[in-house]
Amino acid sequence: MYFWNVNKLVEDLRLNKVSEVDFKNYYIASTIIIFFSYLALTLTPESSASEAWASFILQVGLLMSWMNAIFKVNGGEKGRDFLKRIIALYLPITLQSFALFIVIGVVLNVILPFFSSNLDEAAFKQFNIIKDLIFEVILSTYIYWRIYKAVKQINHPK
């Protein structure tokens, strides 16, 4: 099992070297990450229903469009191991992406208050809501794009 080395995992997937036990373990590890995401959501201050719905609609749109694109690059109806590949790739790509985006998030949260210091409380709250939605969309898009590129590399090696 690879927790970080996406290139090696892509190579093993292309050569059918990932066992069923490995796929099961990738599924378990990936699901734990998803459960941590749910935990984080429950620990954050409550957001409004409109914020939650906006995030949900954006995420569903990204999921549908990227999964269709990944399905096509995997060979569509003639492709192999679509879900297994996504589940296996999700773990190392998400771990790498979270590490990168934590750094970016910390930097943004240090820099942005300087630009938003003259906003009143309501405008500052609205600014943070929009910033968080944009950050979510960019993070999700980045993860889907990395999975897309990895599946493409599996089916069309350089």
Image (spheres, helix red, strand yellow):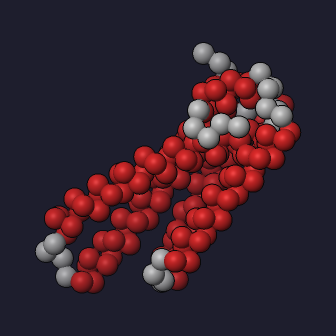
26 or 80, which is in the foreground?
26
157 or 77, which is in the foreground?
157
The residue positioned 26% from the left and 79% from the top of the image is 123
Furthest toward the left, the residue is 118
The residue positioned 77% from the left and 47% from the top of the image is 25
Lateral position of residue 121 relative to residue 103, left or right: left
Q: Quadrant of residue 23?
A: top right
In the displayed structure, would residue 133 be above or below residue 139?
A: below
- Where is residue 48? Give x, y as percent: 48, 83
Residue 12 seen in the figure: yes
The residue positioned 45% from the left and 81% from the top of the image is 45
Lateral position of residue 44 relative to residue 128, left or right: right
Lateral position of residue 42 relative to residue 118, left or right: right
Furthest toward the top, the residue is 158
117 or 17, which is in the foreground?
17
- Where is residue 10? Give x, y as percent: 66, 28
Lateral position of residue 140 relative to residue 84, left or right: left
